[in-house]
Image (cartoon, rainbow, N blue to C red):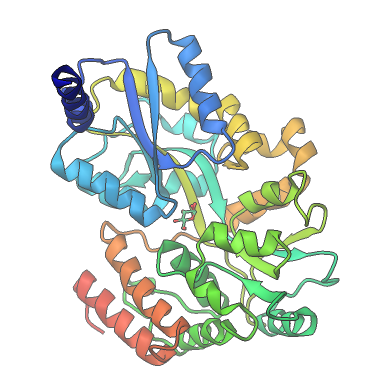
Amino acid sequence: MKTLLALAGCALAIAAAGCGERQDRDVLRFLEQADNGGGWAEIIRRFEEDHPGVRVELVEGPPATDAREALYSTSFLSGDRTYDLVFMDVIWVPKFAAQGWLMPLDDRFPPERREEFLPGDIAGSIYQQRIYRVPMRSDAGLLFYRSDIVENPPETFDELSAACRLHQSPPELWGFAFQGRQYEGLVCAFLEVLWGHGGDVLDSNGRVILDSPEAVAALRWLAGAVGTIAPPAVATYQEEESRYAFQEGRAIFLRNWPYVWSKAQESGSPIRGKVGIVPMVHLPGREAAATLGGWGFGIAAGCRNPDLAWRFIEFATGEEGMKILNRMNGSIPARRSLYSDSEIVASHPHYPELFEALLRARPRPVHPRYAAISSAIQVHVSSALVGRETPEQALDRAAEEIRSVLGTSR
Ligand code: GLC
């Protein structure tokens, strides 16, 4: 019994020690969301097969990007060297780079190789002229709709509201689902409504304009949607909850990321063959806008074996790796060539149009303190959705908080 306890204590100590205490230079570890589809397991299996003795560990974290950012940040702040690779959301790059948590990759990833990737994903991987991330998955917000219910998809906010009212029969069938929970996904959804109203968070001089009349109109529309065309529970939805509502036939329209298409087409999906995709709606005379998302690999500053880490990155972000993740997990490739790849286009006929949407997608404010900017938006937009603040109050407060984060005045 004593030996068993001692052994258990030892295992715990090894687990707690993480990368820093590891004797083994042949282990690579990174944090990602659950491997929904098995694509990561397959990429890792193939890499390990070609590299005998090497082990790659995917640590499964929570689904929300903010929660995984916090886990990486805690690990880097404590210096425990748990992670060798950093699988990063595009919005984390300025902060992680400014903190010195990442190795610059300029020598390994020179400009001529970057051209093989989508330009927005590359731009989002650079901080102060140095590159820190190799894109793996691209992302841009889209509006999905039930093509068996809606004949002409809407282009404006009024048309979307009208189509919802015409076809919905709550509580079984609602009009519009989106990500309304207080987290990063809400910021992405809100920005598309904000941009579609002609508003923005910052103007071209970096001044905060989140309390503009355009922004108030945008939040009025989104808050007004809750309980009228969107289910009240939308205020608790992340990506997957909103996808379930759509895929189970409980919502006609869905704002989400392109991965939804593959899931909706899976055998057994009740909406297979009944899904259309258009850009998010906008005000007449304004333009539709998609939030740029996306994920890619960096190497942690404390990584012991950067050459091995780089070999894994090259494999995972190569054509083969991206095709595996696309086929099995529905991830959107970050390499241009795959948008005209015959195998991929055969199973994703909408990819040529998706490619255009990805080229037009707009970045969220690029700043090392983006997390604080986002948090102000999350708290107050969420309050407005549940009626705790009016849209005016919510945006006045969010704008003031962002001004104080940035140290700017009105
Ligand atoms: C997607 C996007 C990411 C975004 C997140 C918000 O994962 O790729 O950029 O931050 O959704 O939930």
Q: Residue at x 67, y 51 (%)?
A: 354
Vertical position of residue 38 compared to residue 189: above or below: above
How many badges with numbers are in the image?
A: 0
The quarter of the image holding the N terminus is top left
Q: Position of residue 14 (x, y in %)?
A: 20, 25
User: Front-most of 314 and 38?
Assistant: 38
Q: In the figure, is residue 86 to the left or right of 174?
A: left
Displayed quadrant of residue 407 = bottom left
Q: Position of residue 359 (x, y in %)?
A: 59, 52
State whether residue 142 appears in this view.
no
Q: Position of residue 225 (x, y in %)?
A: 59, 83
The quarter of the image holding the C terminus is bottom left
Vertical position of residue 320 compared to residue 136: above or below: above
Q: Residue at x 52, y 68 (%)?
A: 189
Q: Position of residue 279 (x, y in %)?
A: 67, 65
Q: Residue at x 71, y 75 (%)?
A: 172
State whether residue 192 appears in this view.
yes
User: Front-most of 164 and 357?
Assistant: 164
Q: Residue at x 23, y 29 (%)?
A: 15
Q: Residue furthest top?
A: 52
Q: Residue furthest front?
A: 1
User: Front-most of 37 and 279?
Assistant: 37
